[in-house]
């Protein structure tokens, strides 16, 4: 478990993190969302032991990460700006990683190299941006880390490969208990991947919840009524309401049961509770706490 | 958190060997570069030199039947090995800086710094890996080249055991200075945020203090009249205290042979340890997020900025001063360097005037300081008499005609000197004790003033060995009197008084062969003639005493001796025609020719070697200093009495002048002729060394009319007629010596002649 408690970090007179407190459960995928400059990368760099927080504590199962060899052996940080040794090939980078991490898995490396179809003997600086991202990811995953910190990792990867990467991470979580923190400014990246969502805005956490919890309290409803359903809607905690002819599309707060009962009471011609997209959940949550979500997430 | 971090650190290894060796392995491009550089500038030296040496040996053996001795060969090889050692140490220092920059580049870029610091390696691991890797590539390159060099020596058959200490001491020096300069480069690297600034910062650490020091001296030069700032600026001893760069130069230069280099080496060892410790401390505090910025620790950037702009302003001022616009140069240097520093530090030209209030305050301070120094306000430097563990005094009286240098290390005497100098500087400040203008031309017309003033060079050696020289021109003689007393008390080497030697053939001429210069010049001769080498010759001739052959003695006794009433002379034998003879004068140029005559005659005499055996002078080889003396003796036309008679007639007045009290005693008419022999009996050189009891007297000789009688004509003694068996090329000649000008001011310092007493 990663415990982040009251972490603050400033760069000169800019406060990047203003007292961040959260917990990342082992074996989970933790989505870190926020707009540019919200403090995601700073938090990940603190989590990876690159930066030392000005205040607060970051602990992996009770152990600090900063200057801690043992903890860092279990953590891999994949930066948004990949770095490779000058003029290195993939195999040379493998040697480097192997000399640094005790747990580097050659089989995994070979398997993923083949999976991504990357030329191991070619200099990485001749790869495309997406291939470099893949290289960084496959090297990181080949370490078999306990904690994987991904900063905008999916940017620049084509949809097919993105899907593959998501699958690999999900499998590693499921099979090996990997804990992944994935930061992005794009909610769609995290769709169907994360267990927990943390929204950072101007160095502060606005939302920090399990995705399932969020899904349990907000629902999307499609319904067709013969009569005016205004009375029914007043009984619901409606967040948004759209109409297309007689079709009403609502996003409401409340349990599925509560909403279903309220709808049944109005005798709809047709009603259905459908899954919310992550974006919709977010918008609803943001608005719930008084923020205009469009200004915060994409 | 602090407690936990500490315990985590305690459990984490300082460095993981795998990472450390991996870093060194990745430094192979650096190794290749070092190998190439070392081969070019180190190993290539024997490759080029040894075949030439071999050829010389073979040529000498083949064409001149001269066999090189083991010692000869060893000497040449030692020169080659020493040159290699010097080059190697210089290469080591340069390599250290390159290696430091190369292996620390991982932290000079935000992306790479982030990557490396996310790895499971503590900062201590990165730090140690840089040191280890730098040293490893350097050491491998060094050892490979050393082995290659030894192999080359061996292949030429020159691998003598005696050379090994030179090679291995060179390796030791090289390694030592590599570590010293690596510490500088690493400290620079930790405080710098990119590679270019890292390189510049290394130069800054190496040269900031010397540059500030030179700038301070340039500023002082405008205000401090007596301090020898130019000498201080170029003092390698002072500069070597300020930078390891100059310490290397000092240790490698022949200067170091005058004293132990160990204090310098210990100083560098301590400095190096301190720099490593400071670098590690700074690294542990280094914020990775600042990587990429020119200076990691922002306040340090401001300090560096002000350290740079001050000296730049002073240097600009000096340059512009050549065109009479020193202040304009000062302002230009200050503003331009300020703008440049700001632009670099902020990585934007838009920030060139940031913190302008600081610049204004700094400029005002610098200008105020310059004005204080230029206008001599407060006179603080004039009053300054440094604390010293040793004082060297050199006092010139009557221009440079007479001087005495003495070193005082007795504490009480040092304090006496300092008190005197304080009084002196006080006197100067109140306008006493120093002439406003100093011109030898004026003195020619005012011999009394000339006699009354002295030039004083005084060097205070601080307890740390720094020499601070002051020079005071035109100091009133009476003010220096306390110093003269101290100098007389501390005089240890009595110079023999000018003695009257009635038999000049008993003169002992001390053969002091003039060291390396002499040997160098002779080497070629010996190479050509294939006889004994210069060292052997010098050995044979050291302490040899020249005696004259009987025939010469007799001739000289009959014809020259009546005029040679005196003639003690120390000879230093040298190759150049003029070096061997220190000219001595007694009562005029007339007396100069006595020792010259003697020396000429001795050229064809014999000598006694150091074992006391008389050896004939075989040819000019034995006494090469006489090569240019084909001439022989001189025959003076007048006897001593005749000369004195003639001379006395041309002298208007002789004044014995006490320059301390100002008392004068004049001699005119017959008194002059009466005192002339006594006057001539006083050797000017000997008296001027303050070894006598009366340093305060000057004797002024005033000519009557146009000139003194100086036509002491002589003829060259035609040696070939007297000694037909001697093959010398001579032509009899008669000519006049130079004429002494209208007013001759002849100063006999020191001992008062008999007639004065």
Image (cartoon, rainbow, N blue to C red):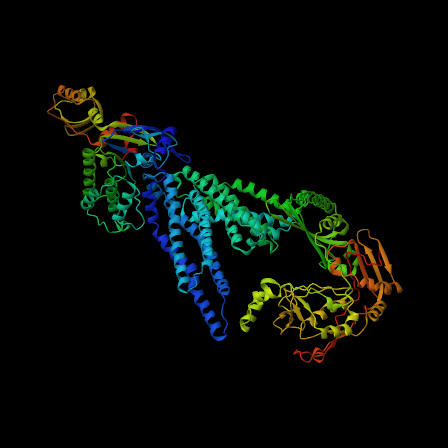
* Nearer to us in this view, B177 or A159: B177
In the image, residue A152 lies at what x, y percent?
Answer: 27, 39
Is residue B669 visible in the rendered image? The answer is: no
* Nearer to us in this view, A131 or A1: A1
Q: The N terminus of chain B lies in which quarter of the figure?
A: top left
Residue B1 relative to residue B201: left or right: left
The residue depicted at 39 percent of the width and 64 percent of the height is B155
Residue B575 relative to residue B359: left or right: right
Instruction: Choose top left, top right, bottom left or bottom right for residue A187.
Output: top left
In the image, residue A149 lies at what x, y percent?
Answer: 28, 36
Q: The C terminus of chain B lies in which quarter of the figure?
A: bottom right
Q: Residue furthest left?
A: A269
Residue A120 position (above or below residue A223):
below
Q: Residue furthest right?
A: B670
Residue B488 position (above or below residue B684):
above
In the image, residue B235 lies at what x, y percent?
Answer: 58, 52
* Nearer to us in this view, B747 or B363: B747
Is residue B44 visible in the rendered image? The answer is: yes
In the image, residue B37 lies at what x, y percent?
Answer: 40, 57
Residue B165 relative to residue B361: left or right: left
Instruction: Choose top left, top right, bottom left or bottom right for residue B113.
Output: top left
Number of marks in the rendered image: 0
């Amino acid at each position: 478990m990663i415990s982040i408690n009251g972490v603050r970090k400033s760069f000169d007179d800019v406060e990047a993190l203003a007292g961040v407190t959260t917990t990342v459960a082992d074996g989970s995928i933790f989505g870190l969302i926020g707009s540019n400059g919200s403090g995601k990368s700073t938090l990940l760099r603190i989590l990876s032991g690159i930066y030392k927080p000005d205040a607060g504590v970051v602990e992996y199962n009770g152990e600090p990460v900063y200057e801690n060899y043992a903890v860092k052996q279990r953590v891999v940080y994949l930066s948004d700006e990949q770095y490779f040794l000058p003029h290195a090939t993939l195999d040379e980078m493998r040697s480097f990683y192997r000399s640094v991490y005790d747990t580097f898995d050659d089989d995994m490396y070979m398997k993923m190299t083949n999976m991504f179809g990357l030329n191991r003997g070619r200099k990485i600086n001749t790869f495309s941006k997406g291939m470099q991202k893949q290289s960084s990811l496959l090297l990181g995953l080949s370490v078999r880390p306990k904690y994987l910190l991904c900063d905008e990792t999916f940017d620049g990867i084509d949809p097919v490969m993105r899907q593959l990467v998501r699958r690999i991470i999900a499998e590693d979580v499921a099979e090996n208990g990997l804990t992944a923190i994935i930061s992005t400014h794009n909610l769609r990246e995290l769709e169907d991947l994360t267990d927990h969502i943390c929204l950072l805005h101007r160095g502060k956490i606005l939302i920090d919840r399990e995705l399932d919890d969020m899904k349990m309290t907000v629902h999307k409803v499609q319904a067709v009524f013969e009569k005016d359903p205004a009375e029914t809607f007043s009984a619901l905690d409606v967040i948004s309401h759209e109409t297309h002819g007689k079709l009403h599309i609502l996003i409401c707060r409340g349990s599925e049961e509560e909403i279903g009962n309220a709808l049944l009471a109005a005798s709809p011609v047709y009603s259905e509770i459908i899954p919310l997209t992550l974006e919709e959940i977010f918008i609803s949550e943001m608005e719930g706490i008084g923020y205009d979500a469009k200004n915060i997430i994409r | 958190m602090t407690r936990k971090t500490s315990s985590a650190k305690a459990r984490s290894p300082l460095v993981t060997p795998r990472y450390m060796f991996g870093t060194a392995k990745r430094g192979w491009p650096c190794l290749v570069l070092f190998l190439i550089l070392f081969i070019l500038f180190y190993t290539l030296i024997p490759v080029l030199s040894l075949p030439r040496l071999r050829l010389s040996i073979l040529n000498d053996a083949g064409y001149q039947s001269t066999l090189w001795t083991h010692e000869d060969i060893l000497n040449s090889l030692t020169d080659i090995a020493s040159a290699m050692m010097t080059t190697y140490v210089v290469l080591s220092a340069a390599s250290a800086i390159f290696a430091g920059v190369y292996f620390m580049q991982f932290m000079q870029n935000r992306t790479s710094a982030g990557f490396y610091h996310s790895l499971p390696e503590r900062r201590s691991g990165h730090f140690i890996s840089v040191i280890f890797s730098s040293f490893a590539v350097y050491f491998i390159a060094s050892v490979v080249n050393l082995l290659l060099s030894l192999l080359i020596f061996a292949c030429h058959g020159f691998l003598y055991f005696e050379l090994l200490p030179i090679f291995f001491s060179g390796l030791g020096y090289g390694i030592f200075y590599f570590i010293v300069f690596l510490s500088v480069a690493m400290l620079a690297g930790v405080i710098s945020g990119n590679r270019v600034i890292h390189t510049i910062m290394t130069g800054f650490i190496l040269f900031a203090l010397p540059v500030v020091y030179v700038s301070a001296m340039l500023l002082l030069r405008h205000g401090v009249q007596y301090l020898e700032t130019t000498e201080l600026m170029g003092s390698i001893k002072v500069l070597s205290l300020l930078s390891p760069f100059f310490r290397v130069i000092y240790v490698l230069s022949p200067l170091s042979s005058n004293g132990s280099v160990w204090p310098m080496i210990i100083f560098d060892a301590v400095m190096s340890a301190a720099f490593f410790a400071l670098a590690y401390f700074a690294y542990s505090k280094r914020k990775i997020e600042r990587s990429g910025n020119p200076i990691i620790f922002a306040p340090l950037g401001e300090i560096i900025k002000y350290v740079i702009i001050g000296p730049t302003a002073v240097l600009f001022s000096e340059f512009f001063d050549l065109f009479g616009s020193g202040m304009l140069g000062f302002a230009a240097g200050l503003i331009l360097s300020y703008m440049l520093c700001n632009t670099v530090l902020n990585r934007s030209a838009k920030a060139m005037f940031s913190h302008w209030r600081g610049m204004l305050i700094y400029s005002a301070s610098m200008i105020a300081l310059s004005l204080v120094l230029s206008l001599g306000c407060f006179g603080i430097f004039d009053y300054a008499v440094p604390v010293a563990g040793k004082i060297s005094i050199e006092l010139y009286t009557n221009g440079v005609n007479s001087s005495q240098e003495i070193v005082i290390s007795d504490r009480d005497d040092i304090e006496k000197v300092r008190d005197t100098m304080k009084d002196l500087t006080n006197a100067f400040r109140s306008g006493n004790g120093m002439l406003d203008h100093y011109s030898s031309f004026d003195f020619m017309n005012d011999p009394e003033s000339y006699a009354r003033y002295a030039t004083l060079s005084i060097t205070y050696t601080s307890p740390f060995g720094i020499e601070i020289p002051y020079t005071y021109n035109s100091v009133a003689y009476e003010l220096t009197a306390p110093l003269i007393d101290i100098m007389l008390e501390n005089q240890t080497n009595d110079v023999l008084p000018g003695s009257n030697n009635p038999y000049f053939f008993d003169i002992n001429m001390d053969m002091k062969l003039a060291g390396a210069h002499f040997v160098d010049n002779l080497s070629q001769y010996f190479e050509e003639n294939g006889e004994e080498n210069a060292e052997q010759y010098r050995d044979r001739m050291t302490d040899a005493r020249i005696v004259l052959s009987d025939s010469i003695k007799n001739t000289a006794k009959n014809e020259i001796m009546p005029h040679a009433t005196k003639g003690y002379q120390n000879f230093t034998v040298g190759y150049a025609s003029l070096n061997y003879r220190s000219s001595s004068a007694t009562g005029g140029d007339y007396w100069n020719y006595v020792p010259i005559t003697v020396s000429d005659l001795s050229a064809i005499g014999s000598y006694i070697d150091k074992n006391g055996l008389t050896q004939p002078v075989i040819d000019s080889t034995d006494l090469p200093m006489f090569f240019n003396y084909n001439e022989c003796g001189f025959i003076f036309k007048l006897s001593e009495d005749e000369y004195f008679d003639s001379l006395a007639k041309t002298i208007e007045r002789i004044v014995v002048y006490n320059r301390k009290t100002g008392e004068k005693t004049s001699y005119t008419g017959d008194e002059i002729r009466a005192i002339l022999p006594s006057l001539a009996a006083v050797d000017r050189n000997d008296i001027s060394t303050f070894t006598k009891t009366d340093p305060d007297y000057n004797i002024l000789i005033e000519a009557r009319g146009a000139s003194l009688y100086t036509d002491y004509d002589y003829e060259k003694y035609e040696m070939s007629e007297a000694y037909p068996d001697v093959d010398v090329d001579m032509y009899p000649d008669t000519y006049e010596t130079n004429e002494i000008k209208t007013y001759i001011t002849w100063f006999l310092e020191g001992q008062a002649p008999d007639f004065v007493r």
